[in-house]
Image (tube, helix red, strand yellow):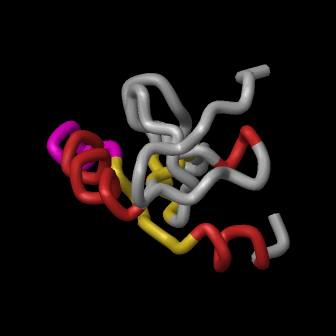
């Protein structure tokens, strides 16, 4: 488990360690869920997720999309409210 760290200026601390942006070194609270799969490794129905803050949403989405992995981007609030 990650130890709590003080957020950088302008960043909101995460309420839980598992709600932190997936971008390397970012400690901001995630507000987006990037839904993806690698068709070479995963069955078509399998979905994996990365979490993203507002600052890193576009960068992480582009990374996945360029590889043909990105399936959807939804707000963390919407994702959390869905019955999964």
- The front one of 26 and 18 is 26
Q: Quadrant of the N terminus?
A: top right
Q: Is residue 23 left or right of residue 12?
A: left
**Residue 44 % position (x, y):** 51, 46
Q: Determine the main secondary structure of the stretch shown in magenta.
A: loop
Residue at 78% from the left image edge and 78% from the top image edge: 81
- The front one of 77 and 26 is 26
Q: Is residue 82 left or right of residue 59?
A: right
Can you tell which quarter of the image residue 77 is in? bottom right
**Residue 65 % position (x, y):** 23, 49
Can you tell which quarter of the image residue 17 is in? top right
Q: Is residue 70 magenta?
A: no
Say whether residue 73 is visible.
yes
Residue at 22% from the left image edge and 40% from the top image edge: 63
**Residue 3 % position (x, y):** 74, 23
Residue, far left:
66
Residue at 57% from the left image edge and 54% from the top image edge: 29
**Residue 26 % position (x, y):** 44, 37
Image height check: is 4 above or below 78? above
- The front one of 49 and 28 is 28
Q: Is residue 19 left or right of residue 65?
A: right
Residue, far right:
83
Q: Quadrant of the C terminus?
A: bottom right
Say whether residue 50 is visible.
no
Residue at 63% from the left image edge and 32% from the top image edge: 5
What range is drawn magenta here? 65-69
């Amino acid at each position: 488990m990650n130890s709590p760290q003080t957020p950088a200026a302008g960043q909101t601390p995460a309420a839980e360690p598992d709600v932190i942006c997936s971008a390397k070194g970012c400690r901001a609270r995630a507000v987006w869920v990037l839904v993806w799969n690698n068709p070479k490794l995963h069955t078509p129905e399998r979905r994996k997720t990365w979490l993203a803050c507002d600052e890193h949403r576009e960068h992480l989405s582009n990374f996945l999309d360029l590889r043909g992995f990105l399936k959807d981007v939804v707000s963390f609030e919407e994702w959390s409210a869905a019955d999964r």
